[in-house]
């Protein structure tokens, strides 16, 4: 496949991940089309305003195309398709229909797919459902934090202009130079998407080994423990707290699932209450002037609660199949309000 700065990208879903990634791809010279549900069309017919916590700037994003019917993919030609539906939505009935249409439209073509949905080995399910070739699909996701403005209670820190943020549809913050991340499940796809993304001039696409990318989801129980503690600042979490300890033990159980292989076993053995918390504390420091606690409470505690719960429930099911009781994860899930 040959890519250029005029590459065409179809982004499935126009939430924070889709819009913010689309904006950066447009800066890279890509032609972007969003596939959205009909009720989102009205909002997206006007320019989208994106507030950058990186430089206290308000950016206008326009110039993209819209599709509202997945069947419209048939006969279309895209260099890349980026799927940004959350894992729960992707495997729901409507999401499965979208996957079916992607498969029908792009089987046997040079179109590459970046699967941005979060789950445990979700790529295997996606390949089976879509019928796409193994070398057509790689995993990917935001490396920055992004959210829909107005839906998160975001405290203002020094360096944030309240009037600009109030005008925004979305806010985002780079925690590192990597604004997007792909894994090497399909190396050629990863390299070519990264090369395109890197043309935007303000953000970078990192390429991770498969094992490292897979393990990202395994920190989910610690996020749940943070939620059960009612979202204190990460600096205020006590590593000896019972709920935090339970979350860390659940992370260890999660990482021992066979899907993570020897890398998961090694990661589990190295997991401690202190080093898991330090990951969150580092993110908290890097996120400023975005408020990390407010972002986590919105992103994990409400926006993606369905996806997060599905991931944890699937971990329990996989543990049962493999003869692992996973007592810490079960105990953690029992603490959830019913």
Image (cartoon, rainbow, N blue to C red):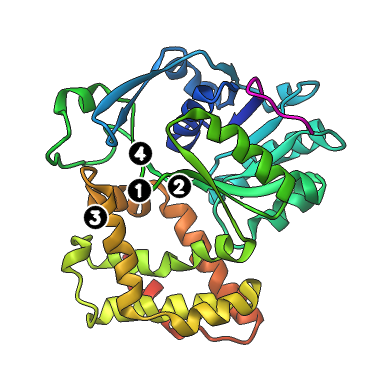
Q: Return the disc, 4 or 3, that comes first in the chain's sequence.
A: 4
Q: Quick check: is 155 in the magenta stretch?
A: no
60 or 99: nearer the eye? 60
* Residue 291 image point, x, y percent: 22, 47
154 or 282: nearer the eye? 282
Q: Which mark is residue 175?
A: 1
Magenta-colored span: 1-7
201 or 136: nearer the eye? 201
Q: Is residue 234 above or below residue 148?
A: below
* Residue 281 image point, x, y percent: 26, 63
The residue positioned farthest toward the right in the image shown: 108
Q: Which mark is residue 147?
A: 4
The local crowd at label 3, few if under 14, some if 14 to 19, many if 20 or more residues have their Cα within 10 Å, is some
Q: CA distance from mark 4 to mark 3?
A: 18 Å
Q: CA distance from mark 2 to mark 4?
A: 13 Å
258 or 30: nearer the eye? 30
Q: Is residue 131 above or below residue 159?
A: below
């Amino acid at each position: 496949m040959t890519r250029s700065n005029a590459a065409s990208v179809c982004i499935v879903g126009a939430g924070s991940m889709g819009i913010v990634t689309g904006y950066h791809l447009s800066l890279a010279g890509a032609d972007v089309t969003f596939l959205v549900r009909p009720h989102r069309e009205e909002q997206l017919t006007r320019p989208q305003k994106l507030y950058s916590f990186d430089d206290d700037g308000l950016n206008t994003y326009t110039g993209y195309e819209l599709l509202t019917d997945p069947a419209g993919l048939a006969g279309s030609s895209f260099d890349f398709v980026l799927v940004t539906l959350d894992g729960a939505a992707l495997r729901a009935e409507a999401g499965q229909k979208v996957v079916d249409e992607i498969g029908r439209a792009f089987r046997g073509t040079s179109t590459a797919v970046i699967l941005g949905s979060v789950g445990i080995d979700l790529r295997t399910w996606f390949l089976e459902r879509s019928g796409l070739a193994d070398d057509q699909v790689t995993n990917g996701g935001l490396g920055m934090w992004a959210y829909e403005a107005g839906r998160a209670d975001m405290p203002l820190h020094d360096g944030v202009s309240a009037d600009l943020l109030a005008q925004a549809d979305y806010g985002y913050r780079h925690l590192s130079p990597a604004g997007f991340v792909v894994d090497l499940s399909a190396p050629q796809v990863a390299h070519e998407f990264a090369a395109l993304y890197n043309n935007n001039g303000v953000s970078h696409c990192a390429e991770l080994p498969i094992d490292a990318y897979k393990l990202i989801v395994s920190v989910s129980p610690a996020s749940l423990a943070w939620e059960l503690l009612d979202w204190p600042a990460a600096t205020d979490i006590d590593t000896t707290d019972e709920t935090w300890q339970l979350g860390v033990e659940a992370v260890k159980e999660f990482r021992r699932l066979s899907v993570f292989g020897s890398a998961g076993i090694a990661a589990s053995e190295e997991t401690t209450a202190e080093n898991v918390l330090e990951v969150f504390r580092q993110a908290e420091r890097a996120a400023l002037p975005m408020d990390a606690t407010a972002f986590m409470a919105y992103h994990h505690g409400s926006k993606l609660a369905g996806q997060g719960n599905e991931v944890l429930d699937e971990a329990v099911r996989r543990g049962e199949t493999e003869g692992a009781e996973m007592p810490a994860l079960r105990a953690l899930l029992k603490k959830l309000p019913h």
